[in-house]
Amino acid sequence: MSVIKNTIVMLFLLITAVCAQDAAMVNSKIVKVEFENDKIRILHAVYKPHDRLQMHSHPAKAEVQITNGTLRIFTPDGKWEDAPGKAGEFFWLEPTRHAVENTGDSIVELIEIEMKNVTAPSRPAGAPQHEGVEGKDQPVPVDQEPHHRWISENQYVRVLDVVLAPGESTLFHTHSHDNVAVRLSDSTVQDQPFGKEWRPASRLLPGDSRYMQGTQTPYTHRVRNVGSTPFHVIDIELLGN
C-alpha cells in the first residue's frame, strides 16, 4: 500500500508542477485558451493595470500585440526588463520561462500562438518575390495578394499584415497553409469563396482570432470591407509546424 500511496503522491506532485508551468493554469483570469489542436494553442492574454502572471513556461510562439503598452518580463534569476509593444506588432519568441507584469495604467492585450511541434531555433527568411498581379481575375497565392503585406518569416510562419479601407476588397487569393487571423480593428467585412456568392457581413473586434485549415485542403476567397472603419488583421501562415 505504501508503494501505491507514494506513487500517487509523486504523480500528484508531477501534475501540479506541470500545471504550474502552464500560463492558462497559473491565472485563467489573465490568460484564456481560445483554440487548441495537435499543432498549436492560441492564448488570449489580457493584463489589466498592475496584473501579474507568475512564473510560467512557453514553447516557441508567435505573438501579436492588440493594444499599445509595456509589459515587465521577469526571468527565473530575478532579473527583469521592460518590453514595449504597439498594436499590430508581431513577435517571435523562442521557448522561455518567465513571469509577466503590467506596470502601467492601461490594459495590455496579446494573442499568443504556441507552437507544439517546433524543435529547432527559428531561422529568419526573406520576403517572397512579388509578381505583377494587379487586376488579375484568377486567384493568386495569398502572399502575392497586394493587400497582404509581408512583415516577417521563418521556417515555421509567414506573417502578413492586411489593411482594407472602407469599400476596398482583396483579390481572390488562395491559402495553402493552415493559418491564424488575428483581428486588430472593429470592422465589418464580407467573405466570398471563389465561384460562390458573398457571405453575410460579419462584425470583427480587436483581439478576435480564427484558425483555418488550408494545408490539406487549400481554400480561395476574397474579402471586402463593407463598414465605415478600416479593417486590419495579421495573417499568420503556419509553414512548418
Image (spheres, rainbow, N blue to C red):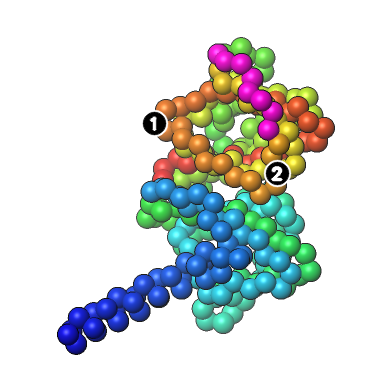
Whether 42 is drawn above or below 137: the answer is below
- Specify the quadrant of the image occupied by residue 222: top right
Which of the pair 80/12 is nearer the observer? 12
The quadrant in which the N terminus is found is bottom left
Residue 64 in the image: above or below residue 133: below
Q: Which residues are magenta?
A: 195-202
Does 138 sit left or right of 226 as displayed?
left
Dot label at residue 205: 2
* Residue 78 lies in the magenta-colored region: no
Question: Residue 143: x percent and y percent?
Answer: 57, 30
Residue furthest toward the right? 228
Name the kind of residue labelled 1 in the image: Gln
How far apart are the alpha carbons under marks 1 and 2? 28 Å
Q: Residues within 10 Å of mark 2 (few under 14, many from 20)?
A: some
**In this figure, which residue is indicated by the disc labeled 1?**
216
Query: From this viewpoint, is residue 27 visible?
Result: yes
Residue at 50% over, 44% down: 157
Amino acid type, mark 2: Leu
So how many labels did they put on this image?
2
- The residue under the point 56% across, 65% down is 28
Residue 200 located within the stretch drawn in magenta: yes
In front: 57, or 132? 57
Helix, strand or loop under label 2? loop
Residue 163 visible within the image: no
Quarter assignment of residue 72: bottom right
Query: Mark 1, residues whose alpha carbon is within 10 Å: few (<14), some, or many (≥20)?
Result: few
